[in-house]
Amino acid sequence: MTDLPVLTLASRPPKLDDRAVEKRVGLVILATDHTTEHDFDRMVAGPRIGLYATRIHYANPVTPETLAAMQPRLADGAAMILPGEALDVVVYSCTSASVVIGDAEVAKAIHSAKPDAAVVTPTAASVAGLKAVGAKRISILTPYTLETSRPMATYFARLGFDIARFTCLGLEDDREMARISHDDIVAFGVEAFDPSSDALFIACTAVRAAEVVARLEATIGKPVVSSNLATAWATLRLCGDIAARPELGQLMTKPLESL
C-alpha cells in the first residue's frame, strides 16, 4: 500500500467574493416542467446572471383546481432556493396558475420567503410585454382546454385588452404541451392570429414558443409575445441587462417600463 502524503493547510484562508455571480435569479417551476430551464439557460443565463431552480409538486390534468393547489407550496419552494440568501429576481413559471392564484398572491407567497426579490409571473410579464410593443388589440393562443382558458380571457380583458381572437388547443397535460412541435406552434399561431390584432400572445411556460417567436413575427408581420419570452425579457431588464436582441423577437428590443 502506498503511503499517504502529509496533509498540510494552506498558508492562509481563501478570499471570498460576496457572490459567485453578480445577479441571482430563482426559478420556481412545476415538477413536470420540460421547458423553462432550457429557455432561461438560452436567453438569460450568462457571466453576470446565475440561475437557481426549484421544483414544486404538480399533478396533471391542467385544471383551475389543480393549478390553485400549488399556492400553498410557493413559499416553501422559493425558500429552498439558496436558503437564507437573497435573490434579485424570482420567477414563478406557470401562466395559467398565475391567473388562477393571482399575480399579487403569487408575489405575496414568494416575498414571505425572499422579501427583497423582484417577483415575475408570466401573466404580469406578458402584460408588460404586450404594452411594450404597443399592443391594445390582441389574439391569444393557449394549449389548454376551454375551461382552463376562460379565466385567462377574463384576465386580459379586465386589464383593458381587446381580444380579437382566442384559440385553445384542448390539451390537459403540460407534458404534452411541452412536446408540441415548433412547426405546429407556428402553424397554430398563424391560425390563431386575427390580422386586425396588434400582437399575438402565446400562453403557457411549457410550450416551446420562445424558440420560434422571430419566425412567427416574420410570418404574420406583427409582434409575438410568449410566456417564457416575456418572463425572460422582464428578468433581464430587472437584472440591468438592456441589450437589444432582435433575433429573439421584437420584445427583446424594448425597455421594461413597469411590472
Image: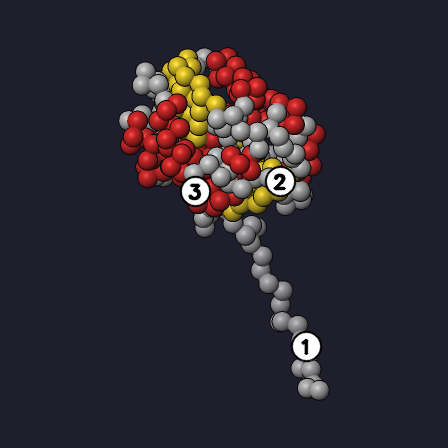
Using the image as rendered, state which of residue 208 and residue 88 is in the foreground. Answer: 208
On the picture, is 69 further left or further right than 139? Answer: right
Crowding near the residue tagged with mark 1, few <14, some 14–19, many ≥20 C-alpha atoms within 10 Å:
few
Q: Quadrant of residue 184?
A: top left
Q: Nearer the viewer, mark 2 or mark 3?
A: 2
**In this picture, is 181 found above or below 171?**
below
Please provide percent x and percent y for residue 236.
45, 38
Amino acid found under the numbered disc labelled 2:
Ala
* Residue annotated with mark 3: 43
Amino acid found under the numbered disc labelled 3:
Met
Query: Which disc is residue 31 wearing?
Result: 2
Label 1 sits on a secondary structure element that is loop
Amino acid found under the numbered disc labelled 1:
Leu
* Residue annotated with mark 1: 7
Q: Quadrant of residue 29?
A: top right
Label 3 sits on a secondary structure element that is helix
Mark 2 touches mark 3? (CB < 8 Å) = no
